[in-house]
Each structure stands twice: as C-alpha cells, then as structure tokens.
Amino acid sequence: MEKLLSIVEAAGKLGLHPQTVREYIWTGKLAAVKFGKAWRIHPDELERFAREGVPPAPVQPSIPADVLDKIAAHRPHLLPVICNLRSCRAAGYSCSVTSAMPALR
C-alpha cells in the first residue's frame, strides 16, 4: 500500500503553498480523504492533478453598457466598480461585477 501524502507533502511536490492545496481540496479540484482533522492525498491523485492541472474557472457573464449606465444613475456609490468594469472592457477583457469588486477597497 502506498503512503498517503499530507497537504504539506503534496504542496511540496506540486510546488504550491499548502493553503492553495487546501482550497483545491475544499472546491473538489483535488480529491483527498480526511482522517480526523488531517487531509491525506493518494499519490495517484497527485499525479493526475499534476498532469491535468486545475480546471479552468467558469466564465462570468458580461454586463451590458446600458445596464451599467442605469446602475450608475441610481447607485452613485457603485461608480468605482462600474468604472473598473468599463476599463476592463476597454482593455478587451470580459468582466463581471465580482472581478470589479477590488475597486471598492
């Protein structure tokens, strides 16, 4: 029987931070088994993950410009988010409200 790997060991083999490995486990991108409080990863699963990589994130739907104008007119406090969305689009990116939220910080 092969030795199951801890999160720290798996992170070292993948060249990732242990917290990143935990997030992949929590989101179902990396299969693991929990023993008490500790997660363990099978070496075959680690090889599969290293070979296939992380599945791509789903594409967020884009908000039409006329909808952004209406939001800006009725909710001026959201103007930084709307400006960020427009600048993303001007650069050729498909943006969503969730990707624009850092503008509020």
Image (spheres, rainbow, N blue to C red):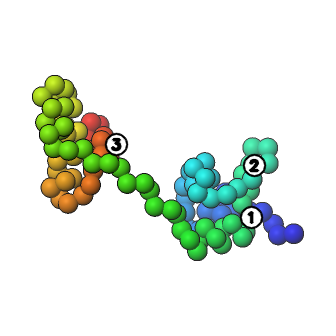
Please state which amino acid type lies under the numbered disc 2.
Lys
Q: Going by the image, does 18 lie left or right of 87?
A: right
Q: Going by the image, does 29 lie left or right of 72?
A: right
Q: Going by the image, does 10 lie left or right of 98?
A: right
Q: Which quadrant, please, contains the N terminus?
A: bottom right
Please state which amino acid type lies under the numbered disc 3.
Thr
Please state which amino acid type lies under the numbered disc 1.
His
Measured in 3D between alpha carbons, the distance from the residue under mark 1 to the one under mark 3, in whole angstroms, is: 34 Å
Labels 2, 3: front one:
3
Residue pictured at 35% horizontal, 50% vertical = 60
Q: Are marks 1 and 2 in contact (CB under 8 Å)?
A: no
Numbered badge on residue 86: none
Answer few, some or many: residues within 10 Å of disc 3's Cα (few below 14, many 20 plus, some between 14 and 19): few
Measured in 3D between alpha carbons, the distance from the residue under mark 1 to the one under mark 2, in whole angstroms, is: 11 Å
Q: Is residue 28 above or below residue 83?
A: below
Q: Are marks 1 and 3 in contact (CB under 8 Å)?
A: no
Residue 66: x percent and y percent?
A: 14, 40
Residue pictured at 30% horizontal, 46% vertical = 96
Q: Which secondary structure lies at badge 3?
A: helix
Numbered badge on residue 42: 1
Q: Which secondary structure lies at badge 2?
A: strand
Numbered badge on residue 98: 3
Residue 53: x percent and y percent?
A: 54, 68
Q: Going by the image, does 75 lie left or right of 101?
A: left
Numbered badge on residue 34: 2
The mark that comes first in sequence, 1 or 2, is 2
